[in-house]
Amino acid sequence: MAALQTRALSKSYGSRLAVDRLDLEVERAELFGFLGPNGAGKTTTIRMALGLIAPTNGSVEILGLDVRRHRSEVLPRVGALVESPALYGYLSGRDNLRVIGSQLGRVSEKRIDEVLEIVGLKGRDRDRVRTYSMGMKQRLGLGIALLNNPELLILDEPANGLDPAGIVEMRDLLRNLAAEGKTVFISSHVLSEVQQICTRVAIINHGRLVRLAPVAELLQDGGEFEVKVDQPDELVAALKRQQWGGEARSEDGLVITAAPDGRGRSLIKFLVDNGFTPDAVSARHRDLEEIFLTLTEDPVK
Ligand SMILES: Nc1ncnc2c1ncn2[C@@H]1O[C@H](COP(=O)(O)OP(=O)(O)O)[C@@H](O)[C@H]1O
Ligand SMILES: [Mg+2]
């Protein structure tokens, strides 16, 4: 059973389709990245997933239950941080957790201590929230999401407003939570924030799913290879005569090229068949940022 599943999920505002037939499946205990440029439809999707707004079409299941039909069963099992958390600035961090805890119904002082510990606010929990840095507020927001010890965490741009040190802290925190078996769904428009922690990512643009894949696969595919041979110039010339080899070039003595069907073994076979016995052939890693830009750039009309 998936932790989160959307089926043909759509939302339109007037004539604008903010989310367009989105199919997502997030497995349990997965750290899943939900990526897209600003305006792509991330927050709208998350709001629908949490039952805060109604879809125009399609459905969302959380932990196997339809969110709209089983709201009261589902929501206590989910923790969420959507955009900036609403905090009481004149109250301490601990009192914020108490107030929100009482709204959730029975959250023990022991749980509040645990949460303060997890989000690293133990020493500052009696200080008023208005004296907190952006990063501390964001961590308190995460603390609120953790109060009911949820199985699924849905975090909308949790790194927003954090400085580089805060981003590292947030990353470690999310990794620990996933290691404990929680499912973490995190949205971002900044790839580098999720590249290092997420196992799989979905990339959306204009409300549509562009790609859903393991990060490692994204880094590989459509990629090029580096070939070390004794005769780089001859090889480049031979590659350029192939339909798939038009982009072949030599850089620092290495030949950079695509492969016949995208696979390294096909390239090696081509090399050997054509008398270029390679010393080494390796997949060239593209920057995830580059892939993201390629996938989200608007097609030339
Ligand atoms: N309440 C709303 N009314 C009208 N349009 C909206 C509303 N909320 C979002 N949109 C539009 O839907 C699209 C997706 O927005 P959003 O989900 O906030 O994107 P993201 O979170 O990826 O930046 C945008 O074009 C945005 O302007
Ligand atoms: Mg958003």
Image (spheres, rainbow, N blue to C red):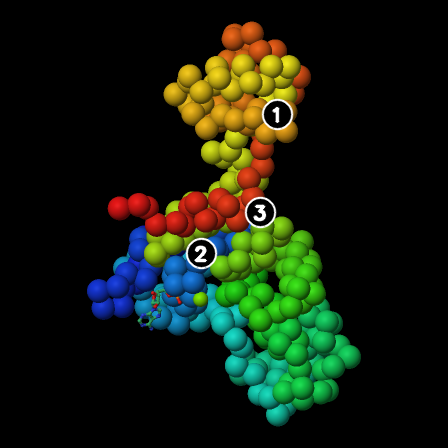
* Residue depicted at x 39% and y 63%: 39
Ligand 1 found in image quarter: bottom left
* Residue contact at pointers 3 and 2, CB within 8 angstroms: no
- The residue carrying mark 3 is 199
Amino acid type of disc 1?
Leu
Mark 1 or mark 3: whose residue is earlier in sequence:
3
Above/below status of 104 relative to 179? below
Amino acid type of disc 2?
Gly
In the image, residue 296 lies at what x, y percent? 41, 50
| Mark 2 or 1, closer to the camera | 1
Residue 69 versus residue 297: which sits nearer the camera? 297
Label 1 – label 3 distance at C-alpha: 31 Å
Amino acid type of disc 3?
Thr
In the image, residue 189 lies at what x, y percent? 49, 59
Q: Are there few (<14), some (14-19), or many (20+) residues within 10 Å of tag 3?
A: some
Q: Mark number for residue 36?
A: 2
Label 3 – label 2 distance at C-alpha: 17 Å
- The residue carrying mark 1 is 254
Q: Mark number for residue 57?
A: none
Which residue is situated farthest in the right direction here?
123
| Mark 1 or 3, closer to the camera | 1
